[in-house]
Image: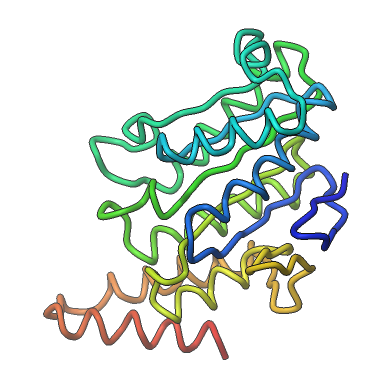
Amino acid sequence: MDLNVDGNTARIPPGSHICQLYNRVEEIRGVTARLLGVGLYNSERCLFVGAPSSVRDIENALAAQEIDVEAAKNQGQLLFETDREQFLTNKRFDPYYLLSTHNTFIAQATRDNWRGVRISIDMTWLTRDVATPEQILKYEAASDAVFTFQNAPIIALMHYDYSKLPGNLVVELLKLHPIAVVGKHIKRNPYYLNSEQYLLKILKANRERASRPQPNDQVLARDFSQDTQRRRA
């Protein structure tokens, strides 16, 4: 299918892992409504995770596409989740637990005879005050490895408010998504890296840190900055 952003389009095959960087939460509505609308038409199960206000915006945008939102919800094809606790573990962000919820969602949709799934998550809303930059990168690297390289029957669209992210994290997020939406532009990402290799670098950095004498917080911050700079090189 084609994903359309203000007249700009890109081909989105199954297994795609997409990042949208926004600076106004309203920007989520148009991209997500287009993605989920095509999924509903193609008999795929669709999920959006975000704030109640974003859910209302997307419901209205889907209705504007002449989609019967209530019927899709009643059939179990269209789901909205506004309680982020079910995607956390003990109120903490676990990157691998969140990925496991996606795999469970895919498996259940397959058992229910849907042709595939589409997931859209406002990650800034989900990870606020509960996730470190490193945890977010672990999640994105693991997701890309599973979805893209295993050709999973999923299209995943993750939204981040770039005005609330450190500049280094924005750069690293772009490296982990083959398709990026920034403002009115959607394109294949020339900075995309092999996520499996990227994940190995993160794990290696963790092992190296664990083998050192316990540093103070200032040194920890310095080490993370140095790791990020090495990944950018």
Q: Which residue is drawn at 40% across and 31% down?
A: 82
Position of residue 58 in the picture relative to residue 225 (left or right): right
**Disc count in the image?**
0
The way the protein has been coloured in the rendering is rainbow
Left-right relation of 201 to 144: left
**Relative depth, front residue between 60 and 174:** 60
Judge whether 206 appears above or below 111 on screen.
below
* Residue 9 vertical position relative to residue 167 in the rendered view, above or below: above
Residue pictured at 27% horizontal, 51% vertical: 130
Which residue is painted at 72% across and 38% down in the image?
154
**Residue pushed farthest front?**
64
* Percent coordinates x, y for residue 219 in the rendering: 19, 85
Q: Which part of the image, by quadrant, shows the N terminus?
A: top right
* Image position, residue 30 (x, y; %): 66, 48
Question: For residue 62, which quarter of the picture?
Answer: top right
Compared with 96, 47 (above or below) is: above
Residue shown at 48% from the left, 61% from the top: 24
Quadrant in which residue 75 is drawn: top right
User: Please, which residue is most extreme toward the left here?
Assistant: 216
Percent of width and height locating residue 131: 32, 56
Locate the C terminus and report the quarter of the image it occupies. Answer: bottom right
Direction from residue 113 to residue 30 in the image, left or right: left
